Structure formats: C-alpha cells, structure tokens
Image (tube, helix red, strand yellow):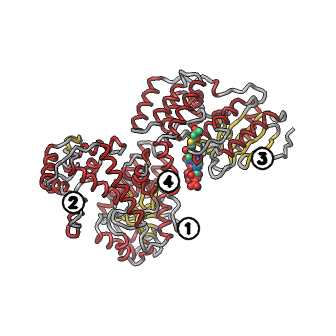
Amino acid sequence: MVDVTTSLTFSDTVSGKAEGDVLVVTLNNPPVNAASAELRQGLWRALDHARSDNAVSAVVITGAGKSFVAGADIKEFGKPQVDPTLPAVVEKIEASEKPVIAAINGVALGGGCEIALAAHARIAHSKAKLGFPEVKLGIVPGAGGTQRLPRLVGCLEAVEMIGTGKPVNAEKAFGIGLIGAIAKGDLLSDALALAQSLKGKPVLRTSERIAPRSDQATVQNTIAKITLKAKGQMAPGEAMRLAASASTLSFTQGLSDERETFLRLRDSDQAKALRHVFFAERDAAKVDGLEHVEPLPLNKIGVCGLGLMGAGIATALLSAGYELIGYERDEPAAEAGKARILDILGKNLKSGRIDQADFERQAANLATTAKLRELAPCDLVIEAVFDDMTIKTELFQKLDLVIRSDAILATNTSYLDPDALAAETAHPERVIGLHFFSPANIMRLVEVVRCAQATPQAVATGFALAKKLGKLPIVTGVCEGFIGNSIFSAYRREAEFLLEDGALPQEIDAAMEDYGMAMGPFAVFDLAGLEIAWARRKREAPTRDPEARYVDIADRLCEAGRLGQKSGRGWYSYEAGKRTVDSAVTEMIAQSRAAKGITPRAIASEEIVKRLIGAMADEGKTLLDKAIAARASDIDLVMINGYGFPAYRGGPMFAASR
Ligand code: T1G
C-alpha cells in the first residue's frame, strides 16, 4: 500500500504523491516543463510504479508552474537520442491498464499536448492552452499527435490546429472535444474526482477511437488555404497531410508515416533555421548592461504626430492598455489623428481581434490635443512627426518644458541622428529611439536605439514598453539607419550592382521571391517610394567617395518622375494596382550600362541570391564590428520581422553561414 503521506521521487523533475488510491505525478522542469530526458525517465518510472503497485488504481499527471509540458526539449534536438523517447513515453501512458488522467494546469504544447492526448481523460484549468506549434519549428508532431488529435476532434479541427501551429484556449479545447472537462474548482481536486469516476471501468484509448467525420472538401480547402499562407515552408503541408490521413490509414500506418516525416524534417535546413530563430528571439531579450535594471513604471503615454505611423503606434499602446494622449500641431490635425486611430480600433473590432468592451475601453483611454502642455502627466512621449531634425528638435525642446525631467523622450526617427537630437535637449539622458515599422500596430519589430547619453534605465524602459506592446524589441546602437535600414541599404546597393551587371529588376525580384522574400527588392523600392533614397543620395553626393562604385539608374528614374508605385511608375509601371514590366525602364538600364561601357551578361538566380544575401551579411559583420548590433542573431531577427526575410531561412547572417 502506498503510504498516503509518502511522496515519491521518480527523477529530479518528476515526483509522485498518493492521494488515496490515486498516484498524482507532478512534472517540474522549470521554466516551462520541457520534456527533457530527465523528465521522460521520471515519468517512465512513475508509470512503472503505478502499474506494479496494487494500491494504485489510477494516475493523475500534472505540471508545476505555468506549464503542463511545453513540448519536447528543443535544446536536445541535434544531440544523440536518450531513451525513453517521447513517443515511447506517450505509448506507455496510453497502454496503461489503469486510467491515466491529464490535469492540464497550463500550456500543453507539442509533445506536452501529445502526453495529454495519450491519457485516457483530460481536464484543464480554465486558463490552460493546448496546441501543436511544431510547424513553427519546421517539423511535425512526432509523438502521435497527428494521429491522435484527429481521433479526438476530427480531421478538420486537427488540420487547422496542426497546420497553423496556433494554440487553443480551454474553452475551445472543450468545445472541439480535445479535453473532456474544464476544472470548475481546484484542478487537482476535480482531476481526482474524475479519476475516481473512471476507476474499474475499461480505459478508452485515443488511438482506438474512430475520428469524428469531417467534410473532406472542407478539409482540403483548409489545407490549401494554410499551405498558401505558409508559402515555401515544408512542415505545414506535411503535418496536415498526416492529420488528414487519420481518416483513412490505420493508427499504426499513420504513426509510422508520422515518425518518418518527423525525423526527416527535424534534420532539414528549414527546421535548423527556425530553431535558430526560436532561440534568437529569447537571446534578444538578454541585453548587455540591462540585466538588473528596473524599467520606469509607465501609465500615461504621449504620441506626438498622429499620421500613419503615429496612429499605428498610438493604437498599439491603446491595445496594450495604456492611457494615451495624442498631440498634433492644431485642432483639425488632432481631430484627424483621433479619427485615424479610432478607425484602426474599429477595424480591430470588425476583424474580431478585440471585442466591443475592449474597443470601448481603448477608445476611452484615448485623448487628443493641440496643446502640448496637456502631455505634462506623461511618463513617456514618443515623437512620430515629420523626419526633419529642426522639427523634431523644436518639439523636444518644448517638451522639455512640459514633461517631468525623468519622463522618457523617444524618437521614432528612421534615419536622423538621435544623439544629435538628444544633445539639443535639457535632459539627454532620457532620450532614446523607438523605431517602429509601419504599420506600427501590426509589425512586431521595434528597434530600441541606445543613445550615447541615455541611461540604462531609459533604454530598459523603452525595451520593456516594446515587450508590453507584444513587439519584438531589438537593441541597436546609433548609426545611420540603425540595423535594419543599414542592412537594407547594402541590399539595395548590391541589387543595383546586379542591375548594372546585366540582370533586370523583374529577374532580381523573381529570384528573391522564389528564395522566400515577401517581395523582391525593386517591388519594395517602388512600394516605399524612390524619392527618400534619392534625396539622401543627393545629400551625400558632395562627400561621396569618387572611387566607390555608384549606380545612377535610380537617379535617372527619379529625374524622369518615376518615383514609385504612388506616382504610377517606378522600376515598374502600375495600372489599376497591377505591376508590369516597363520597356522604358529596360531601355534606361541599357543606356546607363552603355554610358559606363558595361557589357551586360545574363545572371543566374543562384548568383543573384548569393550576392544579395552576401551583401546583407557583409553589412551585418560591419554592424557587429562597430557594436551597433549586439549579436548576429539580432540582425537576423530584424530582417525577418521588419523586412520580410523568410524565417525558415534563418535570416541573412544565418543563411550566409550555411
Ligand atoms: N524546449 C527547451 N527550452 C524551451 C522550450 C522547449 N520546448 N520552450 C521554452 N524553452 C525555454 C526558452 O528557450 C527560454 O529559455 C525559457 O524556456 C523561457 O521561454 C515531439 C517534437 C512555453 C509559451 O514549440 O512557446 O514538442 O532563454 O521566454 O514567454 O511532437 O516558451 O530562459 O534560457 O519563451 O513564458 C514544441 C516553445 C516543441 C513550445 C513559454 N513546443 N516554447 O513562453 O517563456 S517540439 C514548443 C514556447 C515538440 C513533439 C515535438 C514558450 C512558452 P531561456 P520563453 P514564455
């Protein structure tokens, strides 16, 4: 008989405790209960103990902390396998003759969800989340998830969950049959009651269930839709194929196909790249010098300039629950800015991203004004006014007289020197850069600019704010263009070199879009507009290195009034929003080459990709040498989250290192 007071230790991360005749097994592998070898071994021993101890009639498995199990231990990938494997543990759970209940206390992801699926019953905390994020790592579930999930929830729901990698909350999980109950009171108490109700009854194994019927046409349409969205990625299509096969293949056949697919994808370039990105995002949060710095508390935030960028920033702040004061130079502009912000909030409501209560709460937190003094109570003010140093300097000098001396001033400038701006203010130590990317309410990336005189607390406060907004903050030093635009300028320069050497815009764009970029470089230049880069080139002309290669084709386009998509013509022509190759541009390129005595040559897409990735990586190395970027993986994250670089390629630094 297990002594009711005995607590059992099955491994350093797995303990057991008898609650009457039920063995409660607690998984405790901080911080997220990843299914490490140690945890698997402990769970294996706990199941052996339950099987051999006649005093045990049922088992409850639960997690300590915020996770049930966050999945396989990603840090073990690429290392020699240590038994028992997760599939073996999962099969042992399901094979148990005594009922096993999963008491899902927090996130059950990937292998964690597969452990829950193998249990004979599932009950979850109301705040629990369950999901299969494997495709975000370039792999498929590898411990029976593609075969058990459809047998519980049907192929359609299974294809949606496994193909998108998006978790579901407890309510949705209950609604689709993924869990049998949501705890009404204490999770463990409810799980013990469930265990008692199953005692002595034959266990119902998930693998023996028949998948609820799903309309095959709808399943195939869903697969097609998700596959299209996941352009270039292998895992989503493979994962959905496996899940859909559960309605036709035997469990054994499906499991075998899943295992082969998992092992093949786990070693793929895409999976290695996505694992790199996963850990890169976590490393980016470890900012040298800020480890023990407490950010300032932020409640009321001001945004100066409520144009497209400012309204996007304001909406992101309202969505995160901040009180916001939006400032414009006069009442009409302030009113227009308010309308712009409310329009975005209205779109969030219409799309279901927020509900009516959220909308009303966020709208109530918004005030706009043309009186700068009304920003006095702000803890932080972000300026998103026209990118002109005089305008920004005057604004910051006026704000110096309005806000507290310890309130933070953040500039959203893309190209101006924030150190020069800070030097013109009364308290340069509180000036930082927060470089958002448009549309700021959508784009994850925020470059947190570490100005020379900024205190660590000012930088830490900006960093913490970006995290609170659900953004991906990346710290950058001060240089023209910071990390992202520096890399993008190198990318543009090499693209124009390729043009002069013999490639055409449409060939270069096609090569990079086939590589996985959201848009080719010349399409992007047209979308962004050519005039800003043209103005900068004219500004730099007097000091340009006469020995450095300079391509003047873009200048010729601008001089001809071809300023990009907005002007109807740029590198391409645009009629009714459709982008078409323009022979006039081809002619201008030919003339520019001839004027330099360049004989064009055909350039293969492989060379185009290699040279453009190489140019970005070379610029990245320069940024690392100058300590503008803290680590190569930060550069990868900037290009993936701000410039459409495909995550499944890992970013330019990762790709160039392969
Ligand atoms: N393995 C190893 N380490 C992990 C991990 C994991 N699965 N998940 C998180 N960590 C580390 C992370 O690197 C960081 O470490 C710390 O935990 C906190 O993470 C067989 C094969 C669970 C929602 O993809 O989504 O199961 O930086 O900052 O914001 O079919 O972590 O402190 O050293 O993200 O509170 C599938 C990935 C694996 C889940 C918590 N599972 N993790 O978010 O913390 S594949 C996943 C997350 C699989 C099976 C297949 C999140 C989280 P450090 P964090 P968080």
Determine the residue positioned at 38% across, 66% down. Answer: 411
The answer to whether 559 appears left or right of 369 in the picture is: left
Which badge, 3 or 1, comes first in the chain's sequence? 3
Query: Disc 1 designates what residue?
Result: 294
Residue 459 visible in the snapshot: yes
Determine the residue positioned at 33% across, 61% down. Answer: 334
Q: Nearer the viewer, residue 509 or 422?
A: 509
Which badge, 1 or 4, comes first in the chain's sequence? 4
Secondary structure of the residue carrying numbered label 4: helix
State the separation of the CA atoms marked 3 and 4.
34 Å
The residue at label 1 has a CB less than 8 Å from ligand 1 = no
Which badge, 2 or 1, comes first in the chain's sequence? 1
Query: Disc 4 designates what residue?
Result: 281
For badge 1, the amino acid type reads Glu
The residue at label 4 has a CB less than 8 Å from ligand 1 = yes
Query: Disc 3 designates what residue?
Result: 9
Q: Position of residue 558 (x, y in %)?
A: 17, 55
Which of discs 2 and 1 lies nearer the camera? The answer is 2
Query: Disc 2 designates what residue?
Result: 550
For badge 2, the amino acid type reads Tyr
Which of discs 3 and 1 lies nearer the camera? The answer is 3
